[in-house]
Every structure is written in structure tokens, then in C-alpha cells.
Image (spheres, grey):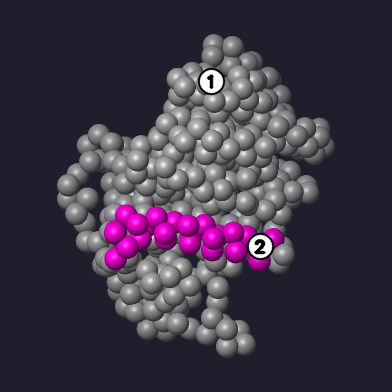
């Protein structure tokens, strides 16, 4: 399994190589983290400093200095069997796309070497990362990921409309993420799902990644069915609406505090929210796609691009991921502020709650910019919350959130 540290690293690449992959989500720093990194250190980056299982590979993005140092610690202390550094650009544009395409190609080549070694050097799923078999698989995986992202975006749209709680929506997202990594928990661990045929996805090799994609789709479909069966399809009463933003919001705890305090979450602008699920990687299905997608995948992989050149799938991925809604790590000018204000207006949010892991430099700079443009410039109240990643939300946080709700009610004449 491949654990990635950042939403800008495409899961499509390891999955196309037959390796289950997911976004790394930890429930707080491990007990040994303090032995490898300083105490006053970004708590999310520090959470990576732990010992991993033999089958776990780490893909660390160059998101910030803290992540670079965490990557160095993993390599120096030998905490993981394989550590790949993925140097994600901080801007989009033709130059950044070309550079990132080569970074992704090298990442794929490194993982392909692992895949070959695990199979004893024979029977690999791809001939090379630039060959037709890999491109066919990459296209099929990309289609599956597009469907998953679209489904999860729909989940958060239903949540914003009051058809399910923000906590439930986030737990569903985490369940799909775990399934992509080859994990299922509780009664979702169903042998029928694990053995589900994947030929309709255009993979057909029966590898772990193909089964992981099938399980992820099953988790999404089953949970949505349960929501309808239990009555969660009915809209809930709406309280004062707030949007949630920050650097990496990867756990439901804060959303639970907001809802417990009587706030309705209008949108979640995070790595496991609208910033990632609004992404669709463009793929050309080809003129002869069949039901299982295999022929369409072959047609796209073999089709000539402009000028007779075959489209570079790594360039396509690079362009799509770098162009998705920017997070605080990107040099996006005032695009983030404009987007956050547009989200607030379209969703009816009356305030913004911004959460930052302690010692996150990106968050501090980002919030100052957003407060100036959205908070002061547009008059939208903003609450800044800071805490350790993965730790329990304190009573002080609940007190501040409650005071924020009362202030918003006063502004709206609801008190």
C-alpha cells in the first residue's frame, strides 16, 4: 500500500500499477514521534515520523519545510521500507505542468520497480510506465477515480443541504479513502465486496488495486443506501451556516464540535472536501468504448494527440491536479480568497471557521490573507482555531465556537 501525504499527489499512479493507495490519515502523532522531530513542529508532519509496516510505502510531497524534514527523518531512521519524495510545484502553468509531469513519471518509475520486485521480476502488470499497457490501466483507473470523486462531491452537496451531518459525510470520505488503501472496517468488511469482479472497470487483472477501487465504490454506494434507509435523506433543520477551511482538515472532530454548538456546516474547503472532489481528470473515452471500458481505454491510449503525438498521461494528470482549487501551499495570488468568498455566497454561509494545525506556517500566512480580503474586505466574520492534529478538541474550542455562533446570531437578529 502507498500512503501519500498530499492531495496534489495522484492516487491514480500507484493504483494503475496494481498497488492500493490512499491519503495518509493518522489519529494523532504516534508515541515515538517526539524521538524523531522537534516538539514545536507541525503536528501533521510529525505524525508521519513513525514505524511503518513492511508493505507500506510513503509518498511525501514537498508541501513545506516541515514535510521535507519529516521525509528526511523517515529516510535517515529507516522508518519505512520505501520513501518517495514528490516535488509538487507551487504554481500552475505550462512550465509547472511540464516539470510536474516529469516528477510524476519518475514517481511511477520508482513504484514500478517496487511492483516488479514484489512479483519476483516477472508477471508485472505493465511493460513500462510509458508503454501502452500502463496507459490503458491508467485511463481505466482515472475513470474510476473520477466517478468516486463525483460521488463524494455529491455527498458533500447533500450534507450542505442538510440531508446528512458533516461528521457523517467526513466519516464516509474516510471510509472510501481506507477502501482505496485496501482496508475495510466493521461490517463493511464483506468477502463479497473483496471478491467483486472488476472487469467493468477496464482493469481485468484481478490485482489488489482493482479490488480496492471496487471496494471503495461499494463503500460509497452502501453508505448512501443506508442514509436513505434510515431517513437521513430528509433535510435537517438548518442553524446558522458557516463554512470550514484550513490547510489539512482530515478528521471529523472539529465538524462535530461545530454541529454540537448549533452551527450548520455549509461547505468544507479542505483536502478531503471540495478542494479535491471537484477535480475531474479529462479522459478521452474513444469512439468504441464498451461497457467494461477496456476497448475505450485502449482506443484512448493508442490515439494520436495534436500533431500526431500521443497525449502524455503524466502531463494530463499534472495539469488537472495543479489546476484544482488551490490550497494554502500554492502561490495562487488572491484566487483562494475569491473562491472562499464565492463559496460563502453560493452556500449562504454567514461566517468562516478556519482551523490550523499548530506550527503550520502555511495556515498562518493564508489566514492573514483571507482575513484581510474576505473577513475585513467583504465583512464576513471569521474564527481562527488552532490545535494539534489528531488530538481531542478542547473545551476551550467549544467555548469559542459557541461564542462565535452567538455573535453570528446577534448579527442576524436571531438572538
Q: In this view, does 173 lie to the left or right of 292?
A: right
Label drawn at residue 172 = none
Q: Which of 332 and 269 is in front in this view?
A: 332
Locate residue 14: give its quadrant.
bottom left
Q: Kindly identify the residue that appears in the image at 70 percent across and 29 percent down.
A: 382
Locate residue 317: give its quadrant.
bottom right
Q: Kindly identify the residue that appears in the image at 50 percent across and 24 percent down.
A: 33
Residue 83 locus on image (x, y percent): 49, 45
Q: Main secondary structure of the magenta part?
A: helix
Q: Residues within 10 Å of mark 1 (few under 14, many from 20)?
A: some
- Look at the image and tell me in which quarter the C terminus lies: top right
Precedes in sequence: disc 1 or disc 2:
1
Residue 335 locus on image (x, y percent): 74, 50
* 54 in the magenta segment: no
Mark 1 residue element: helix
Q: How crowded is mark 2: few (under 14 residues within 10 Å), some or many (20 or more)?
A: some
Residue 331 locus on image (x, y percent): 74, 48
Q: Kindly identify the residue that appears in the image at 38 percent across and 72 percent down.
A: 127
Q: In this view, does 333 lie above or below 46?
A: below
Q: Kindly identify the residue that appears in the image at 55 percent across and 77 percent down.
A: 311
Marks 1 and 2, how far apart in space? 35 Å
* 109 in the magenta segment: yes
Tell me which segment is drawn in magenta: 96-122
Residue 8 locus on image (x, y percent): 57, 51
Q: Is residue 326 above or below residue 230?
A: below
Q: Nearer the viewer, residue 22 or 106?
A: 106
Disc 1: which residue: 34
Q: Which of 35 and 202 is in front in this view?
A: 35
Disc 2: which residue: 99
Q: In this view, does 41 lie above or below 187?
A: above
Q: Closer to the observer: label 1 or label 2?
A: 1
Q: Residue furthest bottom?
A: 308
Amino acid at each position: 500500500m502507498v500512503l501519500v501525504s498530499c492531495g496534489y499527489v495522484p492516487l491514480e499512479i500507484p493504483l494503475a500499477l496494481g498497488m492500493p493507495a490512499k491519503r495518509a490519515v493518522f489519529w494523532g502523532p504516534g508515541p515515538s514521534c517526539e524521538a524523531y522531530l522537534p516538539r514545536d513542529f507541525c503536528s501533521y508532519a510529525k505524525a508521519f515520523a513513525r514505524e511503518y509496516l513492511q508493505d507500506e510505502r510513503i509518498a511525501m510531497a514537498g508541501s513545506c519545510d516541515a514535510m521535507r524534514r519529516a521525509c528526511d527523518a523517515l529516510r535517515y531512521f529507516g522508518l519505512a521500507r520505501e520513501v518517495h519524495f514528490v516535488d509538487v510545484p507551487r504554481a500552475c502553468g505550462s512550465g509547472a505542468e511540464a516539470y510536474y509531469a516529469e516528477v510524476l513519471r519518475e514517481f511511477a518509475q520508482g513504484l514500478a520497480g517496487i511492483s516488479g520486485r514484489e512479483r519476483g521480476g516477472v508477471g508485472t502488470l505493465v511493460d513500462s510506465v510509458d508503454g501502452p499497457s500502463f496507459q490503458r490501466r491508467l485511463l481505466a483507473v482515472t475513470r474510476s477515480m473520477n466517478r468516486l470523486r463525483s460521488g463524494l462531491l455529491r455527498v458533500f452537496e447533500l450534507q450542505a443541504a442538510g440531508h446528512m451531518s458533516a461528521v457523517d459525510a467526513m466519516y464516509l470520505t474516510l471510509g472510501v479513502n481506507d477502501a482505496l488503501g485496501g482496508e475495510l472496517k466493521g461490517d463493511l468488511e464483506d468477502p463479497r465486496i473483496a471478491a467483486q469482479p472488476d472487469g467493468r472497470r477496464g482493469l481485468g487483472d484481478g490485482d489488489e488495486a482493482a479490488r480496492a477501487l471496487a471496494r471503495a465504490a461499494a463503500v460509497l454506494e452502501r453508505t448512501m443506501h443506508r442514509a436513505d434507509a434510515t431517513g437521513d435523506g430528509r433535510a435537517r433543520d438548518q442553524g446558522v451556516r458557516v463554512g470550514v477551511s484550513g490547510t489539512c482538515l482530515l478528521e471529523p472532530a472539529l465538524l462535530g464540535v461545530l454541529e454540537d454548538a448549533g452551527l450548520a456546516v455549509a461547505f468544507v474547503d479542505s483536502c478531503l472536501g471540495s478542494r479535491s472532489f471537484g477535480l475531474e481528470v479529462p479522459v478521452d473515452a474513444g469512439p468504441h468504448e464498451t461497457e467494461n471500458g477496456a476497448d475505450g481505454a485502449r482506443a484512448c491510449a493508442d490515439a494520436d494527440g495534436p500533431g500526431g503525438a500521443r497525449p502524455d498521461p503524466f502531463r494530463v494528470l499534472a495539469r488537472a491536479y495543479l489546476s484544482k482549487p488551490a490550497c494554502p501551499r500554492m502561490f495562487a495570488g488572491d484566487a483562494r480568497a475569491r473562491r472562499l468568498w464565492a463559496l460563502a455566497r453560493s452556500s449562504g454561509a454567514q461566517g468562516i471557521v478556519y482551523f490550523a494545525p499548530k506550527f503550520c506556517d502555511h495556515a498562518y500566512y493564508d489566514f492573514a490573507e483571507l482575513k484581510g480580503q474576505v473577513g475585513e474586505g467583504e465583512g464576513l466574520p471569521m474564527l481562527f482555531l488552532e490545535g494539534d492534529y489528531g488530538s481531542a478538541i478542547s473545551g476551550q474550542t467549544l467555548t469559542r465556537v459557541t461564542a462565535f455562533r452567538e455573535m453570528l446570531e446577534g448579527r442576524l437578529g436571531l438572538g
